[in-house]
Image (cartoon, rainbow, N blue to C red):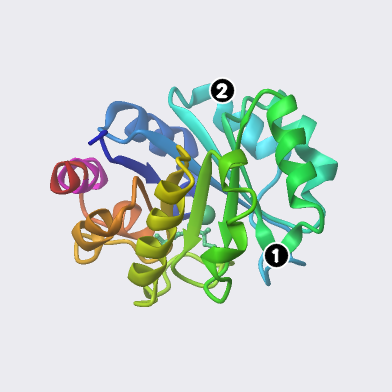
Amino acid sequence: MSEKKIAPSLLAADFANLQRDIEMVNASQADWFHIDVMDGVFVPNISFGMPVIEAIGRHAKKTLDVHLMIVDPDRYINDFATLGTDILTVHYEACTHLHRTLQAIKAAGMKAGVALNPHTNVALLKDCIQDIDLVCIMSVNPGFGGQSFIENTFEKVSELKALIQSKNAHTLIEIDGGVTSKNASELVAAGADVLVAGSFVFKSDHPMDTIEKLKNQVN
Ligand code: DX5
Ligand code: ZN
C-alpha cells in the first residue's frame, strides 16, 4: 500500500503570516499544499486569487494541489499552470464538458482532479475515471473551512474505491472538509489516499505536531 498523504489547507492559515505558515508546512511531514480558490459564484464565499497564489508559490516547496471552486474553470487552466500548480482540481458540478476540461488540464502539464459535492454520486465518474488523476470527495459543502464532517462520506469513499479498481484506474482519492484525527483512520480504511485538513491543523496549538500525528496515524 502506498503512503497516505496529508495536505494542509492554507484557507485556515493566518493570511497576515502566510510566509510563516507556508514555511511551517515546508518543515513538517505534510505532503502537499491544498489551495482553495473560491469565486463567490460557485460557492458563497471568495477566498483568494492569482496574486496570492503567486506569492504562495514563491515559498512553498511541496506539491501545489489547487482546488477550484469556481464556475467556468476552463478560462484559467493556463494561468494556474503558469503559477506552478501540480494538480488542478475542478468541480464536476461546474463543468459541462468535463472530459474536455480534463484533457486541457493535462495538456497544460498538470495532473487533473475532479471534486464532487456531497450530493453528487461517485458513479457519475464511471465513464471518465481513467482520465482522472485525483477525485476530491467533499465531506462538507464547499465554501468554508471549519464545518463538520458529513458521515455519508465513508460510503462514497468505498464506492469510489470499488469503481477505480473495477476500471484498473490509478486515481487517488482525496477527502476535503472536516477531517480530524477522529475520522482519518476510517477514511483511509475505506480507501482514501490524501487527507486535506484546514482547521484541524492550523487552529491547533502546535500545527506541526498535529500534522506529524495525523501522518503517523494513517501510515
Ligand atoms: C472547503 C475547502 C476545504 C477547507 C477545509 O470548501 O475546500 O479545503 O479548507 O477546511 P476544514 O479542514 O477546516 O474543513
Ligand atoms: Zn479544498
Give the mark nearer the N terminus: 1 vs 2.
2
Instruction: For mark 1, give the secondary structure.
Output: helix
Quarter residue 172 falls in: top left
Q: Where is residue 24 in the image (x, y as percent from the top left)?
A: 33, 34
The residue closer to the viewer here, 133 or 33, is: 133
Q: Where is residue 13 in the image (x, y as percent from the top left)?
A: 44, 49
Q: Which secondary structure is most common in the magenta stretch?
A: helix
Query: What residue would you read off at disc 1?
Result: 93
Does the rendering let one see residue 139? yes
Is 210 covered by the magenta stretch? yes
In this rendering, the answer to whether 98 lies above or below 81 is below
Q: Does the residue labelled 2 lie within 8 Å of ligand 1?
A: no
Mark toward the viewer: 1 or 2: 1
Q: Where is residue 73 in the image (x, y as percent from the top left)?
A: 77, 49
Residue sitting at x 85%, y 43% = 75
Q: How far apart are marks 1 and 2 (CA)?
A: 31 Å
In this rendering, the answer to whether 12 lies above or below 87 is below
Residue sitting at x 53%, y 38% = 133
Task: Indicate the quadrant containing the N terminus: top left, top right, bottom left or bottom right.
Answer: top left
What is the residue that sits farthest to the front in this orientation? 166
State the count of labels.
Answer: 2
Q: Which amino acid does label 2 sit on?
A: Arg
Query: What residue would you read off at disc 2?
Result: 58
The residue closer to the viewer here, 171 or 47, is: 171
Is 26 covered by the magenta stretch? no
Crowd rating for badge 1 (residues with CA inside 10 Å; few <14, some 14–19, many 20+): some
Q: Give the range drawn in magenta.
A: 207-214
Does the rendering let one see residue 46? no
104 vs 219, left or right, is right
